[in-house]
């Protein structure tokens, strides 16, 4: 009985040390060595070195001089601590009303946009934190952004096209544009918009409320 208990305790201790200490340390060390940016949260910094978000987590942009992401149902919106979709089904009246209101707003703010509102701009992603848009949804907003910034649409579209990411490994997913990275690129190339009073606790991007940590607002 005692012998069996000692053997069990030894096995438990060895397993805890190997899987609970050595293995996590080894994986963390390899990640920091090979993929330090990704391992630390894929932080995105502006030209002043301030962290303005994560490339993996979407955040809201409301000013006309910035591309806007998909809507978010995560917490109060784009909340990394409350990742979720709306869970509203296709027969939901609340969903229908929300989509209609969002489409009306987008059409009002984008009078020169080509064609109908892209579906992804009125529907939240499953996580509520999707940082990407399709190139088509970004191009749909280009006339508004170009007008607000006073730049030629051709220059803006050239910048947008240079930020289109291809399919992962060439076959997974669809071409996409990271909204935060594109907005930062606009600030670098065309100049930052005049700052507005901060509405959040982060450093901000052109007056937008920027996250303190992934998904924070």
Image: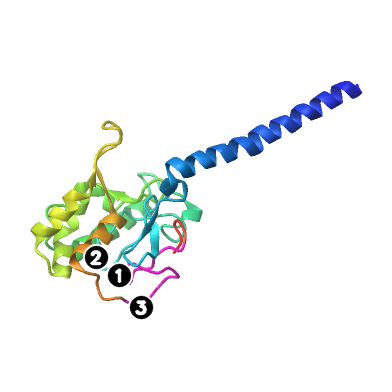
Q: Which residue is mark 3?
A: 197
Q: Residue at x 13, y 52 (%)?
A: 115
Q: Is residue 142 magenta?
A: no
- Dot 3: within a 10 Å radius of its alpha carbon, few (fewer than 14), some, or many (20 or more) residues? few
Asked if 92 appears above or below 52 in the picture, the reply is: above
Specify start and end residues of the magenta stretch as a single range: 196-212
Q: Is residue 209 magenta?
A: yes
Q: Is residue 108 visible?
A: no
Q: Residue at x 53, y 42 (%)?
A: 28
What residue occupies the far bottom of the structure in this picture?
A: 197
Q: CA distance from mark 2 to mark 1?
A: 8 Å
Q: Could you tell which of marks 1 and 3 lies nearer the N-terminus? A: 3
Nearer to us of marks 1 and 3 is 1
Q: Which mark is residue 206?
A: 1
Please state the horizontal and vertical placement of residue 62, each as a whole percent of the image. Answer: 30, 66
Q: Which mark is residue 50?
A: none
Q: Quadrant of the C terminus?
A: bottom left
Contact, CB < 8 Å: mark 2 with mark 1? yes
Please state the horizontal and vertical placement of residue 166, each as a whole percent of the image. Answer: 24, 40
Q: Secondary structure at mark 3?
A: loop
Q: Quadrant of the N terminus?
A: top right
For residue 198, side relative to residue 152 (left or right): right
Q: Nearer the viewer, residue 159 or 68?
A: 159
Q: Nearer the viewer, residue 139 or 84?
A: 139
Q: Residue at x 49, y 39 (%)?
A: 30
What residue occupies the far front of the structure in this picture?
A: 33
Q: CA distance from mark 1 to mark 3?
A: 10 Å
Q: Nearer the viewer, residue 97 or 195?
A: 195
Q: Which residue is mark 2?
A: 187
Asked if 35 appears above or below 192 in the picture, the reply is: above
């Amino acid at each position: 009985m005692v012998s069996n208990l000692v053997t069990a305790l030894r096995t438990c201790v060895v397993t805890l040390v190997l899987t609970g200490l050595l293995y996590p340390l080894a994986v963390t060390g390899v990640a920091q060595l090979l993929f330090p940016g990704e391992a630390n949260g894929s932080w995105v910094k502006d030209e002043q070195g301030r962290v303005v978000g994560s490339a993996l987590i979407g955040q809201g942009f409301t000013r006309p001089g910035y591309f806007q992401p998909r809507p978010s149902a995560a917490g109060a919106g784009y909340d990394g601590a409350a990742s979720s979709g709306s869970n509203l089904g296709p027969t939901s009246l609340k969903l229908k009303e929300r989509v209609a209101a969002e489409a009306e707003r987008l059409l009002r703010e984008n009078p020169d946009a080509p064609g109908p509102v892209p579906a992804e701009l009125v529907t939240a992603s499953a996580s509520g934190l999707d940082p990407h848009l399709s190139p088509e949804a970004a191009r749909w907003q280009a006339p508004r952004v170009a007008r607000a910034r006073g730049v030629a649409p051709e220059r803006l579209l050239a910048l947008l096209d240079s930020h289109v990411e291809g399919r992962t490994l060439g076959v997974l997913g669809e071409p996409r544009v990271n909204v935060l990275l594109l907005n930062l690129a606009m600030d670098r190339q065309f100049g930052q918009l005049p700052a507005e009073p901060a509405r959040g606790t982060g450093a901000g991007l052109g007056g937008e409320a920027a996250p303190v940590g992934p998904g924070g607002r």
